[in-house]
Image (spheres, rainbow, N blue to C red):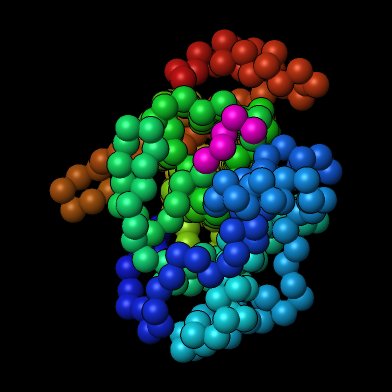
Amino acid sequence: SQGGDTGSNPVRATNSLLTPAEHYRLHWLSGRRVALRFQTAEERGRLANEPLVPPVISADVPGLISAAFTDREKLAQPATRSAVEQTIAALDTGALRVAEPQAGSWSVREWVKQAILLYFVLRESSALEAGGLHFYDKIPLKTDWERSGVRVVPPATARFGSYVAPGAILMPSFVNIGAYVGAGTMVDTWATVGSCAQIGEGVHISGGVGIGGVLEPPGARPVIVEDGAFIGSRCVIVEGIVVEREAVLGAGVVLTSSTPIIDATTQPPVQHKGSVPARSVVIPATQPKDFPAGTFGTPCALIIGRRSDSTDRKTSLNTALRSYGIAV
């Protein structure tokens, strides 16, 4: 569920919980400054020469957020509202992520997803503009793309609280709050990167791909696409699926938590659910299932080969697409 956009607010909503300088600090990658943004020209002029550091999350922030998620009345406390804003600002700069790889698996920060849900509660809708386009929403859009190192083709949009790393390209597409898009990744035309989705470096997300958002329940794993993966056009990936590094999905593959992912390269075939093994080459398929009315084909995904382990990802991808005749 994308979640977050509905629900009553027990406290007065506000769009200015932090000072302008606190609200938009810095994009930070590998210790270098790549973007700086303030709300007003006055703040920009006064603070432009100050030493800049990545957003710092106070040690008490996770506890404040978890307590407020259980008891919404705590949102009336300035310290709690500040904790929520600190978290969203850190997500926006890439200093914090909803989920990160640890010891071969992915660890989800439940309190960060709680902060996103609380951010929706605290915000009130306001008029937004992007060039000649007009919107009315609770969450502002990312701006100042020219300093971010990201190429953005109109009318691509990314919500504040998402992170897009330098070298990424956004064709006309949408990136939701909490999402992370790695360096050098292409998000092609009319693709969507849902809330909290984690997209690695050097990934190609083809036109019309739907990467689902997973905000609720907060402890649920988001959709994860690891480094170097290729996602073919019109694929749909939802419900916390993990596409492991350098996997190749042909056009039209649909993956949910219950979709059988069958490895046809082994005897007997091996079935996976919830994740696509690294470097697998996958196409959409069906498998027979008996119903009262007869036997019908039900959707599955078929692993038909492996991408070579090469230091040149482009070469290994082209070889895999050609060798297996994959439609992209």
Could you say which quadrant of the image residue 109 lies in? bottom right
Q: Residue at x 45, y 18 (%)?
A: 327
Query: Residue 178: horizontal and vertical position, in percent?
Result: 55, 54
In this rendering, is residue 215 above or below 265? below
Q: Residue at x 57, y 46 (%)?
A: 41
What quarter of the picture does the N terminus occupy? bottom left
Q: Residue at x 39, y 79 (%)?
A: 12
Q: Relative to the observer, which residue lies in front, 163 or 200?
A: 163
Could you say which quadrant of the image residue 296 lies in? top left
**152 left or right, relative to 184:** left
Q: Is 144 part of what is drawn in magenta? A: yes
Q: Residue at x 32, y 36 (%)?
A: 133
Q: Is 56 part of what is drawn in magenta? A: no
Query: Residue 100: horizontal and vertical position, in percent?
Result: 70, 54
User: Is residue 277 visible to the viewer in this orientation of the structure?
Assistant: no
Q: Relative to the observer, which residue lies in front, 290 or 25?
A: 25
Query: Residue 205: horizontal and vertical position, in percent?
Result: 51, 30
Query: Residue 33: horizontal and vertical position, in percent?
Result: 77, 40
The boundaries of the magenta stretch are: 143-147
In this rendering, is residue 72 above or below 3? below
